[in-house]
Image (cartoon, rainbow, N blue to C red):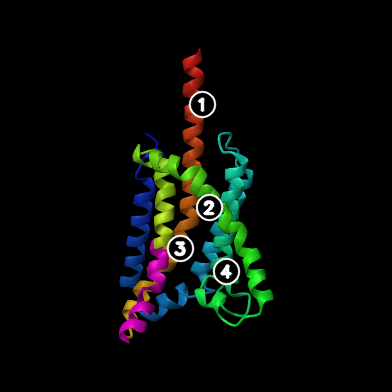
Amino acid sequence: MHPLDHPRFAIFFIVLTSLFTLLLWLWLPADVLIYHTEEGRIVEQLTLYAYGLTILLLLLLPVPALKPTIRYAVIIVLLTMMAREADLHKAIADMSMLKLRFWTGNLPLRDKLMAFGLLAPAALACLWLLVSQGGATLRAAKQRISWAVSVVAFVALIALTNLLDRSLGIVKDGLGWHAPHWLVALQTSQEELLELALPVLAIIALLQYRRHSLLAGKTCLSSQL
């Protein structure tokens, strides 16, 4: 079996990324680690490049079994994630349009309509992917098909990175406890490097799906001969 076809390949990749980040945290001073993982620094830049490469592969890589509607829906979602990573979700009124107070606050209606127009395509793409492909992907993941496991791992990792992003802030707001510097370094580094893993995981899933579809096509052709 090719390593890429292993059903747990994506899981191994996520765990190794987290372990590598832990080693960096143990090796580097907290200030240095925070500096390189904060917004606008090297890790965020690498993440943006990785999203760009992922979108380029989705546009150019021939995957005969991948329907154009699925391909372009995924591209819309990844473009939105790339924009968020570049902090473009705060481009209107310097406030995140992903937060409830953006919509319930006193911002002009024009700003809210503009934000709605920007977010609606991604929301519709996510909803369409969930309705049209969610069930089939979950069934394939239960059958330990590599690309489906990677897709499920991708979604789970989005939830995990968002939880990491808010974890210390929730504790601070709820208990008034300020985390020590070493814990901030650990939380920030894990969050940012796992966010870097997201577009790489999308590439892995794409390559796995391509291999799976090509192998399935060869098997089908052989059975007809």
Q: Which mark is residue 195?
A: 3
Q: Compute the Cα span from label 2 to label 1.
A: 29 Å
For the residues labelled 4 and 1, the Cα–Cα distance comes to: 39 Å
Residue denoted by label 2: 127
Q: Position of residue 209 (x, y in %)?
A: 49, 39
The mark nearer the N terminus, 1 or 3, is 3
In this rendering, the label closer to the viewer, 2 or 1: 2
Label 1 belongs to which residue?
Answer: 217
Amino acid bearing label 4: Ala
Mark linked to residue 86? 4
Badge nearest the viewer, 3 or 2: 2
Amino acid under disc 2 = Leu
- Magenta range: 160-176
Kindly state the secondary structure of the residue where label 3 is placed.
helix
What's the residue type where badge 3 is placed?
Answer: Glu
Residue at the image position 37 percent from the left and 83 percent from the top: 173
Pointer 4 local density, CA inside 10 Å: few below 14, some 14–19, many at least 20: some
Q: Name the side, left or right, on which 24 lies relative to 82.
A: left
